[in-house]
Image (tube, rainbow, N blue to C red):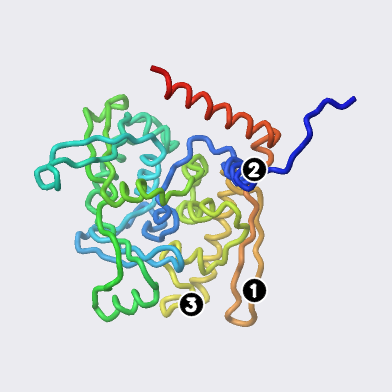
Amino acid sequence: MNNAPASRELSDAEKKRLERVGNRRGRNRPSKVPARLARTSAFAPKRRGLITDSSFERLYIVRGHSVVRVSGRELGSQHRDALYAVFRLGHESETVRDPSATLGLRNYMKVETSWRELLKCMGLTQHVNNVAALHYTFEDIKKVVVTIYEGDEQRLLEKFRQGKLPKDGGKMGNMLHDVEWTGLGLDDRVCVYYGEWSAAMVVSAKLVSLNADVQFALGSDYAKSFWPYIDSFQKHSWVDEDRLAELVGRDLWGPHESAETRRDFRSKCRKALDDMVKAGGLRSWRAEIKGDGRRKSRRYHYEHGLDPQLELPIAPEKILEMEETTKERTAKVAAAP
């Protein structure tokens, strides 16, 4: 005789919950990154030769996702990694007195940790030389003002070309407000305060879960530029080369590009995708040639290296039961005197 309980069809809420849990894809301490920072070309795919002139200003556009203006200096791969390491660690709120604030108080989000922990998060050797390098990286980030514009990308671009300030909505601020430390030894404490822009993105929950282990394992700067975008769209399985070009601030068919530069870019794309496979982010990839003649383009199809089904070998009913039990325990603790 079969004593198993009768099965029932899952409700819409339960199905969505299962999908949400399944899509975590076994991420170990992911970085909760503002979506605009995962889908932007504001970080150059290089570590050296960056423009450090304080008068630097550039507009970065990724169609359908972000229109970002960076002022103060050019940012590179090391700056992206440092920010992602900060977002990977848990933050807390701190209220401080500020005469310029409306009520004389200002609330900040901060991450308190050690230099050693930051280096571990980034997969870097725990050495004082890397502490010094990270210190200067934070210093660079503090010099930068980021402006995010809302609205139609083409209209915004036309306004900038005309030297006019867009009338659309937007937000300007620093990604990091302040960085304090007790020393530059590996185990010295360091406190990183989010900038107003970063804090606003966190509060509004405009975040994506990034597989940081893969990000920090990548050796190619182009891969570091592509992976956050690819990983932020968990259900996508292909990306066009035009999009990849946007992510590194290029227009493959623009006036400054040629057949030779496009060949070089495609070579970098292949190496970047191979790097993602090596780092475990992708299982495989292939290129599809689209179009005819001189305007041939590539579409890169890929398979994520972490399969939701393999990472979650628990029966759906059991997952729901575990989640309900957790809710009941939380309610009991809250009701306890």
Q: Quadrant of residue 123?
A: top left
- The residue that label 3 is drawn on is 253
Instruction: Determine if residue 39 is in view.
Output: yes
Q: Quick one: SS at disc 2?
A: helix
- The residue that label 1 is drawn on is 290
Residue at x 46%, y 42% (from the top left corner): 216
Check disc 2: other Cα within 10 Å, few if <14, some if 14-19, many if 20+.
some
Instruction: Determine if residue 278 is in view.
Output: no
Task: Tell me which label, 3 or 2, sits earlier in the chain.
Answer: 3
Q: Is residue 68 above or below residue 139?
A: below
Frontmost of labels 1 and 2 is: 2
Image check: 190 left or right of 19? Answer: left
Decide which of 145, 233 is in the foreground and name it.
233
Instruction: Identify which amino acid the numbered label 1 is placed on.
Output: Lys
Q: Is residue 56 above or below residue 103?
A: below
Number of numbered tags placed on the structure image: 3
Q: Quadrant of residue 280?
A: top right
Q: Are marks 1 and 2 in contact (CB under 8 Å)?
A: no
Q: Quick one: SS at disc 1?
A: strand
Task: Tell me which label, 1 or 2, sits earlier in the chain.
Answer: 1
Q: Are marks 3 and 1 in contact (CB under 8 Å)?
A: no
Residue at x 21%, y 36% (from the top left corner): 95
Percent coordinates x, y for residue 38 in the rendering = 44, 53
Residue at x 46%, y 67% (from the top left corner): 64
Q: Which numbered dot is residue 84?
A: none
Q: Quadrant of residue 186?
A: top left
Q: Residue furthest left?
A: 99
Task: Tell me which label, 3 or 1, sits earlier in the chain.
Answer: 3
- The residue that label 2 is drawn on is 308
Percent coordinates x, y for residue 194 in the rendering = 28, 43
How far apart marks 3 and 2 lie (CA) works out to 37 Å
Percent coordinates x, y for residue 299 in the rendering = 61, 66
